[in-house]
Image (spheres, rainbow, N blue to C red):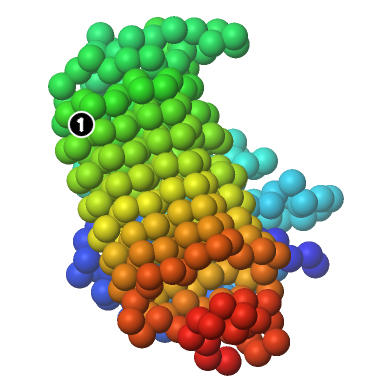
Amino acid sequence: MKRYTARINIVVKNEDLWKRLAKVDISKYKLGAKFGEELFKGIGTSFYLEKKWFVSDKALKSLVISIRKRLGSDAIIIADLKDTDKVTGAEKNYIVYSLNEVAEDAVINTEDHRKSTIRDVETWFKATGYNLTAKDYYFFAMFPGANFDKIRKRLASNVNIDDFKFTADKNGDLVITKYLGSAKDLFVPAFEPKGGRIVEIRDGAFARTGVSSVVIPYGYTKIGKNAFAECKYLSRVLIADSVKKIGKGAFAECTSLQSIRIPSSIKKIPDEAFYNCESLLRVLIPANVRLIGNAAFAYCDNLEKVKFSRGNRVIGNSAFLACEGLTEVELPQGLLCIGGEAFADCINLDKLRAPANYGWIGEEAFVNCGERFVILAKKGSKAYEYAVNRRLPIKAV
């Protein structure tokens, strides 16, 4: 029997429940995975774990049961089979059965089989006694599928459509060209009143407006250049994985921005995307992101943690210039290039863990880092040789 890639998201309501969830011993389930980073901060708290598993694997179901016993209806569990295109033959029917066994009291989200496996979300939650809040609905607006479209349309109906200027693209879908409203917490509508889809936010559409939080739901494919630039009150942004492209400087100078969910669907974080977002604290770079653009996170003064993924290949020039909150960075395996001044003036950066080999490292990539700055690298690797040749502090690991 073949293995498939599955991800289990466990979403809980608050920090206390999060701590209780963290106590679940997952080692006995032999999943070969650990609870991942926090996602959707402020919209709910989500742990995820991802592994290759057999469709008949009972360990996942056992884990779901354990979490239910510990948290009851305060946990939402979403089982997501990622590579359904590889399912063939009789296994197609079995995989649906298996997923329902894994999360028999959960929402199921798959691509090829979503019509037969996604339940009516609202009906399910009402039946379990889970009291849905507006923020819960925002979370569900992130997922594909007809049932989730119902939620997106309802949320869109609560938005004053006259606050937006639109034009049509070549496919007849609508794009937002300008926001005229004054809402603070904004759900960007994915549908207009007659049911037409809205798929794009054009250049500068929300720039210099007074929004403080933004939800961009599933269905949007592009966010234009400087789309939210200089929104000085914007603190949280949630972007669905349907977005394929984000334009240069899209969130530049958003000085209050603390939390951003970068969609896993994009391949490039553009130049200056989060330039001078001085309140940004943590960033998770998804595995599909190949390129982190020039000055993408430059002058994010309070950035404390950047979690890279194995798929990240290029870090551009000045990408993390003057990120004074960084103290330790672990670069991903498979990284090919670090641009010039990529981590320059990170004056509190003391430790940089480097993968074995790079293709290229730019000039002054680590100039003016912390007083105790050291590169941790395998002896004989390109990173090690780079440090030795430039007389940078190096420690063999």
* Location of residue 71 in the rendering, given as x and y in whole percent from the top left corner: 29, 68
Question: Tag count in the figure?
Answer: 1
Q: Quadrant of residue 188?
A: top left
Residue visible at 44% across and 7% down in the picture: 167
Figure check: 240 above or below 340: above
Q: Residue at x 32, y 15 (%)?
A: 178
Q: Would you identify the image quadrant in which residue 159 lies? A: top left
| On screen, residue 239 above or below 394 | above
**For this rendering, which residue is in front, 385 or 235?**
385
Q: In terms of depth relative to the viewer, which is nearer, 296 or 343?
A: 343
**Looking at numbered disc 1 in the image, what kind of residue is underneath it?**
Val
Q: Is residue 201 visible?
A: yes
Name the side, left or right, on which 86 lies relative to 102.
Answer: right
173 is higher (above) or lower (below) than 58: above
Vertical side of 325 occupied by 387: above or below = below
The residue closer to the viewer here, 363 or 166, is 363
Q: Name the residue at 45% across, 27% down.
A: 224
The quadrant in which the N terminus is found is bottom right
Residue 154 at what x, y percent from top left? 32, 24
Q: Residues within 10 Å of mark 1 (few under 14, many from 20)?
A: many
> What residue is rendered at 62% in x and 42% in y?
111
Q: What is the residue that sits farthest to the front in this orientation?
A: 390
Picture coordinates of residue 330 (x, y %)?
Answer: 49, 74
Q: Secondary structure at mark 1?
A: loop
167 or 270, nearer to the observer: 270
Residue topped by disc 1: 211
- Residue 97 in sight here: no
